[in-house]
Image: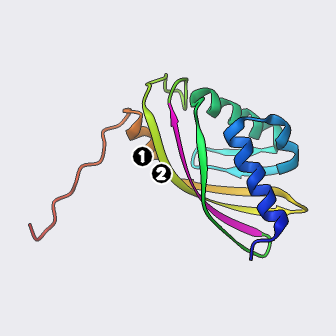
Amino acid sequence: MLQDAQGKVLDLLLEFFNTGNTKLADQIFTSHSEVHTPDRVWRGTQEILSNTSATRAAFPDIHFVDESRFADGDRVVFQWSVAGTHQGEFMGIPATGQRVELRGVSVAQIENGRIVEEVTYYDRLAVLEQLGVVARKREVPSAAG
């Protein structure tokens, strides 16, 4: 069952991502927090802030939505969706003007009301397809047809 402190830190995390309010970072993360993504591991509040700022610069209208969440002990799993328009460099890719939408899942370990570790899963290939960097997946015909 999700505890109040766990729900509060997830609410702050969404606000942090959606507004870019850097003052919230110290309420969410510790200096030893780690955030694992398909791209790399971000260690400590400063690296996490740097990544968030770079992502918001690339997608200024980025908006995360909390789809669902549940907890087991000190771990919280939350499913989210995000959308934004690619208006700045991202992963070395110059702005394309393309709208990107995807869903993902994050698992966070929360201690003393702050995230100490977060592991995030999303379809990186889908992002690259939506940016037009790689060809979109083709439908595979069924064996019956």
In the displayed orientation, state which residue is furthest to the right: 112
- Residue 102 against residue 95 in the figure, above or below: below
Instruction: Determine the residue positioned at 42% across, 46% down.
Output: 126
Q: Position of residue 95 (x, y in %)?
A: 48, 23
Instruction: Determine the residue positioned at 62% across, 55% down.
Output: 120
Disc 1: CA contacts within 10 A as few (<14), some (14-19) or many (>=20): some
The amino acid type, in three-letter code, at marker 2 is: Asp
Numbered-mark total: 2
Left or right of 94? Residue 51 is right
What residue would you read off at disc 2? 123
Residue 108 visible in the shown view: yes
The residues colored magenta run: 75-85
Instruction: Determine the residue positioned at 80% across, 56% down.
Output: 9
What number is the disc on residue 126?
A: 1
**Whether label 1 touches label 2, CB < 8 Å:** yes
Left or right of 94? Residue 40 is right
Quadrant (top left, top right, bottom left, bottom right) of the C terminus = bottom left
Disc 2: CA contacts within 10 A as few (<14), some (14-19) or many (>=20): few
